[in-house]
Amino acid sequence: MSLQLDTPPGIEHRRARQREEARRTILDATELLLIESGGFDFSIRSLSKRCGYSAPTVYHYFGDKDGLIDALLEERVAGLADAIEHLPVTHDALADLRAVLKVFVGFSAAHPTFYRLMWTVSSRGQTRTTPALERLRARVGPPLDALARSGRLADAESAGQMIWALLHGLSALRVIEPAHPWVPNLGELAIETLLRGMTQPESDEASR
């Protein structure tokens, strides 16, 4: 008859902490390499040298390079989604949309590499749709739809595409020309100009 020995709680807790520390170290090193390369042009070998963990260890925790990038991207985008979800929802759809986009602009200015990664595809040709990205879409769609229903916006779909194109352009410019003296509030100015140009003034009847 064999004896079943349970792992002492202290040992299991230590192992869990070591696993979390390994993941954290690998993700932090990945972030530095992504920022330095301006994208995902790095090798697992270079990551191993940077973080101190072997390639098999990296693969053990994240599966492959795409899994590693997705895990890091989910962390960063989740922070953005949290910030947007804390914004109050009012009866002014345009003000709500402006507030959401302002947070987006701040994120893309502070983290241009991650903003670009949000809209890239994996090596398997799959979009990087993470749970956090779905949370973001859930806050952008409603105010656009509300503006369209009120008659202030001709088409929510085309408006959404124009907004994404503008945000992508702003982010790409900061990556391509990081040393250029960009206007500090360029993103907010661009968003405000776009919103003003694609929306109609609120009617007197709707404002009553």
Image (cartoon, grey):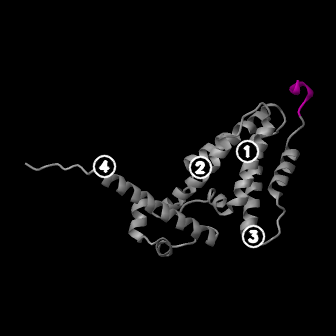
Outermost residue, left direction?
Answer: 1
> Label 3: which residue?
178
Q: In the picture provided, is 187 more to the left or to the right than 36?
A: right
Give me the C-alpha separation between circle 1 and circle 4.
Answer: 45 Å
- Residue interval drawn in magenta: 202-208
Q: Nearer the viewer, residue 163 or 136?
A: 136
Indicate the secondary structure of the residue bearing disc 3: loop
**Residue 6: horizontal and vertical position, in percent?**
23, 49
| Amino acid type at mark 2 | Ala
Residue at image position (87%, 50%) is 193
Q: Residue 9 carries which label?
A: 4
Q: Whole-Å distance between the Cαs marked 2 and 4?
A: 31 Å
Determine the CA span between mark 1 and mark 3.
25 Å
CA separation in Å, label 4 and label 3: 50 Å
The amino acid type found where label 3 is placed reads Pro
203 in magenta = yes
| Rendered position, 26 above or below 150 | below
